[in-house]
Amino acid sequence: MLKSYSHFKWEAGTDEAGRGCLAGPVTAAAVILPSEFENTIINDSKQLTEIKRNLLRPIIETQAVCFGVAHIFPSEIDKINILNASILGMHRALDQLQTDIEHIIVDGNRFKNYHKIPHQCIIKGDSKYLSIAAASILAKTYRDAYMEQIHEEYPMYNWKKNKGYPTKEHRAAIEKYGATKYHRKTFRLLPEQLKLGL
């Protein structure tokens, strides 16, 4: 795992979670880690167990130079589309950093200029750079916590388990109970053959 992409001291890593979900926000995080930061467990959040992610979150939060997390909710996702919502989330997370950002590294291949600060998109960046991996862990843990919270309101969708992803169980619940205010109306909530007659 590499510490930084550029020679700049204040390089922020950013990533998002929940892009492919049918319900709930897309959540982005941005992190600046100190140059002396060391951790052998941190990795792309998808490669870690929930227990490990939850153990790493307070370590990242207390040892980072600064971090930010932002939710973009379904109403906004439906207005601007999921790609724009993901990038907006990253921008809002970067807005929260209390340090002058000198360079930004982004997981994936799409980003929009942020205050003319140089940036680099990195495919699979969350498995290559510590700050992006740390951002992926914060985005995932904050989003999961939010989905567990709204699960209490609509337990029939079992968001506590599926976190809003398009599982068979989640789609069966949408077919039975319909969509909620937390569902993304512009997403294909049900396969075409189930939409007939709805």
Image (cartoon, rainbow, N blue to C red):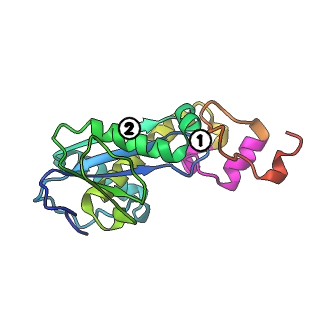
The amino acid beneath tag 2 is Ala
Is the stretch drawn in magenta largely helix, strand or loop?
Answer: helix
Looking at the image, residue 175 sits to the left or right of residue 26; the answer is right
- 127 in relation to 194, above or below: below
- 72 in relation to 194, above or below: above
Q: Position of residue 58 (x, y in %)?
A: 26, 47
The amino acid beneath tag 1 is Ala
Q: Quadrant of residue 184?
A: top right
Farthest-out residue, front:
116
Looking at the image, residue 11 sits to the left or right of residue 169; the answer is left
Q: CA distance from mark 1 to mark 2?
A: 16 Å
Q: Which residue is mark 2?
A: 70
- The segment highlighted magenta reads 158-175
Q: Residue at left 25%, top 52%?
A: 118
Mark number displayed over residue 54: none
Q: Quadrant of the N terminus?
A: bottom left
Q: Position of residue 138 (x, y in %)?
A: 34, 48
Q: Quadrant of residue 97?
A: top left
Determine whether the residue tagged by mark 2 lies in a helix, strand or loop: strand
Q: Which residue is mark 1?
A: 23
Which badge, 1 or 2, comes first in the chain's sequence? 1
Q: Position of residue 148 (x, y in %)?
A: 50, 40
Q: Residue 87: tell me if it is visible.
A: yes
